[in-house]
């Protein structure tokens, strides 16, 4: 059984650790304090660090991992559609749409035969078949934004470079299969969403939905 551990998710820092049933690990983004993330990493078993894009909440601690010799796959050295085939994993970078270059990752565990998609900081979701688990940016609720804009109360419009829960639901609805596990990540910290409502909406299209709260550990 593989597992996914969210150290944190949101604009104050993103980092998650994917671990297969033999203990091999991948670190997904490094926007959370190095010392804190460290406590969850077994460096002998860490295959690589994947960086989606160069925004601080995703890459702030990159230097620390470079210094200890971790293999890093990041926008500067990957190409969309060019497979990264390394021991224990096959990783496909996928071009996303954000306000800077950003990649999603489709990760296949050769050990557990599981396919995990990590899609964050985007307004576009690529078509992906047979996912076992989808981690998806679910930053805001269009209804709340609409209410706030009618009151002219939006001070921070960072959300426009992210996905809304409505877009996530439309995507899941358009797939020709049911994704077994969906983890809604990067929820807005500015009151642009309500996690209970997100759970309710997404649960119509998936039987096992979670919010990527701090320290969430999910088995895949
Ligand atoms: Zn970003």
Image (cartoon, rainbow, N blue to C red):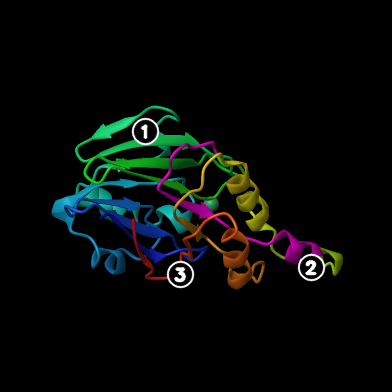
Query: 181 or 106, which is in the foreground?
Result: 181
Name the N-terminal-most of marks 3 and 2: 2
Task: Name the residue carrying label 3.
Answer: 213
Quick check: can you spot residue 28?
Answer: yes
Task: Label 1, secondary structure: give it.
Answer: helix
What is the residue that sits farthest to the left in this orientation?
44
Which of the labelled discs sits on residue 148, or is there none? 2
- Percent across and percent down for residue 158 are 65, 57
At horizontal 56% and vertical 61% (from top left) the residue drawn is 203
Which of the labelled discs sits on residue 218, or is there none? none
Q: Is residue 93 left or right of residue 122?
A: left
At horizontal 27% and vertical 54% (from top left) the residue drawn is 2
- Percent across and percent down for residue 5 are 34, 62
Task: Name the residue carrying label 1.
Answer: 77
Q: Mark 1: give few (<14), some (14-19) or many (20+) Cα within 10 Å.
A: few
Q: Is residue 42 magenta?
A: no
- Percent across and percent down for residue 211 are 49, 66
Query: 93 or 56, which is in the foreground?
Result: 93
What is the span of residues highlighted in magenta in the rendered image?
Answer: 126-146
Q: Is residue 12 left or right of residue 74?
A: right
Tell me if residue 65 comes above or below residue 82 in the rendering.
below
Task: Label 2, secondary structure: give it.
Answer: helix
At horizontal 38% and vertical 35% (from top left) the residue drawn is 92
Q: Is residue 165 left or right of residue 91?
A: right
Of the two numbered discs 2 and 1 in the rendering, the one whose residue sits closer to the viewer: 2
Label 1 close to label 3 by CB (< 8 Å): no
Tell me if residue 132 comes above or below residue 95 in the rendering.
below
Of the two numbered discs 1 and 3 in the rendering, the one whose residue sits closer to the viewer: 3
Mark 2 residue's CB less than 8 Å from ligand 1: no
């Amino acid at each position: 059984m593989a597992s996914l551990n969210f150290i944190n998710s949101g604009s104050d820092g993103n980092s998650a650790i994917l671990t297969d049933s033999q203990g091999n690990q991948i670190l997904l983004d490094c926007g959370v304090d190095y010392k804190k993330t460290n406590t969850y990493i077994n460096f002998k078993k860490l295959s690589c660090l994947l960086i989606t894009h160069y925004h601080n909440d995703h890459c702030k601690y990159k230097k620390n991992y470079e210094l200890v010799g971790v293999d890093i796959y990041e926008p500067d050295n990957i190409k969309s559609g060019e497979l990264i085939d390394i021991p224990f994993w096959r990783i496909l970078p996928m071009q996303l749409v954000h306000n800077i270059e950003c990649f999603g990752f489709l990760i296949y565990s050769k050990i557990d035969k599981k396919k995990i998609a990590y899609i964050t900081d985007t307004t576009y979701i690529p078509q992906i078949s047979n996912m076992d688990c989808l981690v998806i940016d679910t930053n805001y609720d269009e209804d709340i934004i609409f209410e706030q804009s009618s009151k002219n109360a939006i001070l921070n419009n960072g959300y426009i470079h992210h996905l809304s829960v409505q877009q996530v639901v439309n995507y899941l609805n358009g797939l020709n299969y049911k994704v077994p596990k969906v983890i809604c990540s990067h929820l807005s910290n500015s009151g642009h969403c309500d996690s209970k409502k997100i759970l309710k909406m997404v649960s119509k299209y998936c039987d096992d939905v979670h919010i990527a709260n701090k320290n969430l550990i999910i088995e895949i």
